[in-house]
Image (cartoon, helix red, strand yellow):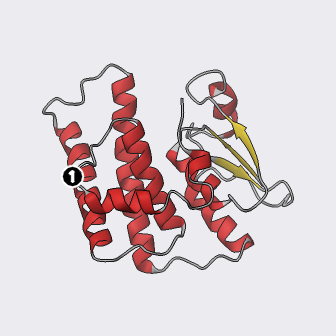
Amino acid sequence: MKIYGSLTSPYVRRLRILLASTPYDFENTNIFGSDREKLKSVNPTLKIPMFEDTDNTNLPLLLDSNLAFEYVQEVLDLAPLNWQEKNDLALINSCNDSLVNMMILKRSAVDTSEDKLYFNIQRERSEATFSYFDSKLGEGGLTEWNYVTISLLVLIEWAGFRNLYDFSKQKNILEFIERNQSQLGVSETSPVE
């Protein structure tokens, strides 16, 4: 198995943590620099991760983290996600996409703190999503270490790493992060520039 992606991408990190106990190759890819044309030639979305199973010649190069998860879930015989977990994953993905867009805008020298509809929607989505998960964690939810909790941890740590959200008032989220630092692959994949 092989993952193409960057060391900082939250979508890549999910898979790296999921596969922490499974042998796989990792190819660090600079999607904003030298590897952009190569990426474009195989993936029209220009997104990472990309995933391949070099032992399965019938499998196309998978161009989405959730597709890669579904494949890994099947190959490694991991428990399927139930509908609530799929719903939670959809919330995580939506928030993650919003924050990625805000990060790209900031890198493009756009002032995302302005009172503009687009920025307000992204901030509102992030606030509502993190409040939802803080409450859910406070009620004793999300105790199983699986793709959903991995994705949540990765999103939170990435949002903090990129200074896109302040979690200082969400104690349940902070406790969740602290509680899961010893999970296999978490500290080894922490985002770094």
State the image coordinates of residue 84 (x, y, percent, origin top left): 40, 77
From this viewpoint, which residue is outermost toward the left?
115
Left or right: 77 as drawn, with respect to 155: right
Left or right: 91 as drawn, with respect to 126: right
Q: Amino acid at mark 1?
A: Lys
State the image coordinates of residue 52 (x, y, percent, origin top left): 75, 52
Which residue in the structure is indicated by mark 1?
A: 169
Looking at the image, residue 44 lies above or below residue 114: below
Q: Quadrant of residue 138?
A: bottom left
State the image coordinates of residue 170 (x, y, percent, origin top left): 25, 56
Foreground residue among 23 and 12: 23
Question: At x 77% / y 53%, what residue is drawn?
Answer: 24
Helix, strand or loop for disc 1? loop
Looking at the image, residue 10 lies above or below residue 163: below
Tell how many labels.
1
Question: At x 28% / y 57%, what residue is drawn?
Answer: 130
Question: At x 37% / y 54%, what residue is drawn?
Answer: 94
Q: Quadrant of residue 33?
A: top right
**The C terminus lies in which quarter of the figure?**
top right
Instruction: Give the crowd class for mark 1: few <14, some 14-19, many >=20 residues within 10 Å.
Output: few
Looking at the image, residue 32 lies above or below residue 70: above
